[in-house]
Image: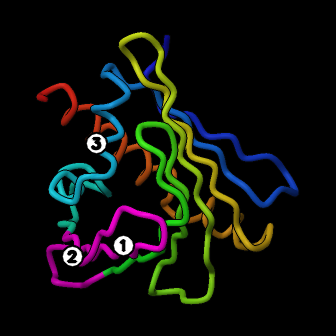
Amino acid sequence: MTTATSFTVEAARQDIVITRVFDALCELVFKTFTDPAAIPHWWGPRRLTTTVDVMEVRPGGRWRYVQRDSDGSEYAFHGVYHEVVAPERVVSTFEFEGVPGHVVLDTVTFEDLQGKTRVTTRSVFQSVEDRDEMVHSRMQSGATESWERMAELLARA
């Protein structure tokens, strides 16, 4: 079973599917994904510092993370939780504040694989163009690095 992060990006569709298998129990992976204290240790590229501004993990709750680079530039992201079913699923929105108005709907599922956990994120964009812009950004390398960082954090747990 592979632990590499895989991306499914089909032509003329508005979604991206990201899958990764973690060598950890489903409950631990879900907890790490939803714990504000854990987010700075795995979310985003290592070269950026991530701060959790707000994280209310419940239906209707908000989240906002701010990342800073070594020059002090800030990049903020926010959204709203629509569904939280522990340890199975989180549905929330995602918006990069640097490009407001381009909201993504993320559904993250956690599948128990007898000691391992498959995490699948399906991100649905408002248009194919929005999806394609995300694909051409550094999204894939950032997402891969985030999942690698999460695997490292889980291995220490």
Amino acid type shown at disc 2: Arg
Sequence order check, earlier mark of 3 and 2? 3
Q: In which image quadrant can residue 49 be found?
A: bottom left
Residue drawn at (40%, 63%) of the image = 58
Sequence order check, earlier mark of 2 and 1? 1
Is 139 in front, or is 95? 95
User: Which residue does the numbered mark 1 point to in the structure image?
Assistant: 63
SS class of the residue under badge 3? Answer: helix
Residue drawn at (50%, 51%) of the image = 90
The location of residue 105, given as percent across then percent down, is: 62, 65
Question: Decide: marks 2, 1 in contact (CB < 8 A)?
Answer: no
Instruction: Specify the farthest residue to the right.
Output: 12
What span is colored magenta in the figure? 51-74
Q: In which image quadrant can residue 43 be found?
A: bottom left
Q: Is residue 39 left or right of residue 125?
A: left
Q: Return the mark for residue 68.
A: 2
Q: In which image quadrant can residue 61 be found?
A: bottom left
SS class of the residue under badge 1? Answer: strand
User: Which residue does the numbered mark 3 point to in the structure image?
Assistant: 31
